[in-house]
Amino acid sequence: MNFPIDKIRNDFPILHQKVYNHPLIYFDNAASTQKPEAVINAITNYYRQDNCNIHRGVHYLSQKATEAYENTRKAVQTFINAPSSPEIIFTKGTTESINLIASSFGKKYIKEGDEIVISAIEHHSNFVPWQVLCQEKKAVLKFIPVTPGGELDMDGFRRMVNEKTKLISIAHVSNVLGSVFPLKEIIKQAHQSGIPVMVDGAQAVSHLQVDMQDLDCDFYCFSGHKMYAPMGIGVLYGKEKWLDEMPPYQTGGEMIKEVFFDHSTYNELPFKFEAGTPNVEGVYGLHAAMNYIQELGLLNIAAYEDELLKYATRKLMAIGEMRIIGTAKNKTSIVSFLVGNIHPYDTGTILDKLGIAVRTGHHCAMPLMELFKIPGTVRASFALYNTFDEIDVMAGAIIKIKQMFA
Ligand code: PMP
């Protein structure tokens, strides 16, 4: 495959350092990705040249920053092929996007006895907001069962949906197992019964080409920092018909049209959901990150990362006494595993001392760990700058760890 890996690695300054005297191998990309020079420059150039509050000033800097901010909204629209740009709301990230829906959609549409369906495999961010909402509204939270390989039990899903179901909220890609869920099937089935579907796309947008018009989901959430952009910036896409009817999530400046002593009227979309001064530097960084991804092409990135995942899975399985947690047919960029009986924390700590950054533990999915009856996993998650050589080094390190514990 002709993937410009040397050039890409040069674009990411942080990768070129030693950790405990070993070259850094960064396999914690599902937690957060590193940033290319183009993103770092976009942020520093914003503060050097454009810094100003937006939407409020008549002066040059304010107009320049406002234009860049709104252009990024259009760029996000193109990036995810959303029907229109007012359907793109800037948030702090996936967690805030989901909380926005749980709070606002929940206030308007969820009543006692209603049901919300999620899966047993969700990140706490797509779990706890619904749990709390259901407790507040005396609604019922239901969980699509998961197969031992980490796929959704679709028969279980079909049995679960009924006239009481008011919302389905599901990850696009599991942050623990890398499973890609059959969203189109879920959405089609839900829409036949008039049920809206929210998608947690935190682990998808940097690995798969996502297309709002093709998926036809009602809401889609993601975080910039998992797609080479800064922390503290994220997106909520929502269909206009829902966002128009939903009440504001936060109130204050920018989200109002007029304020009187006894009441206020609200701004139009998307501003109704963007109260207060937004993260303008984050939006500049996000734009640069999307440009970076688009220059390489998501299909090329996906193909390269798929090769990395297959190679890593083969290499790890060849070691022996390895348990791969999550063997879905459709997977991307994440391999979760256990080495013999060694506690994942021990494996992760020794890998770290050898310069290899992986994540260990429950990965913010404690119910899934309970279901699988494991204390946690070691998770290696790949990004476009990782290499086959790095996977070889990790496999060699695991062989050493096994010998140490033998
Ligand atoms: N959902 C999934 C699937 C995730 O992987 C994460 C981050 N680990 C989140 C939600 C939360 O994202 P953030 O912390 O950026 O809000």
Image (tube, rainbow, N blue to C red):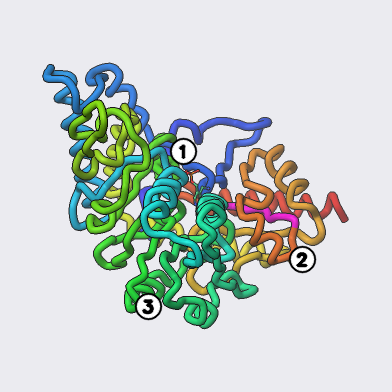
Q: Given this view, does label 1 or label 3 mark the residue nearer the observer?
A: 3
Residue 11 image position (x, y, % from top left): 38, 36
Q: Could you tell me residue 155's position as x and y percent?
A: 52, 82
Q: Quadrant of the C terminus?
A: bottom right
Q: Residue at x 67, y 48 (%)?
A: 360
Alpha-carbon distance for marks 1 and 3? 37 Å
Q: Give the labeled residue for mark 2.
A: 321
Q: Badge 2, how many Cα within 10 Å: few under 14, some, many 20+?
A: few
Task: Using residue 375 as the reference point, say whether residue 267 is left or right of it.
Answer: left
Q: Nearer the viewer, residue 53 or 176?
A: 53
Q: Mark 1: few, some, or many residues within 10 Å (few <14, many ≥20)?
A: many
Mark pair 1, 2: CA separation: 32 Å
Tell me: 339 left or right of 163. right
Pair 1/2: label in front? 1
State the mark number for residue 189: 3
Q: Which residue is mark 1?
A: 34
Residue drawn at x 34%, y 57% is 219
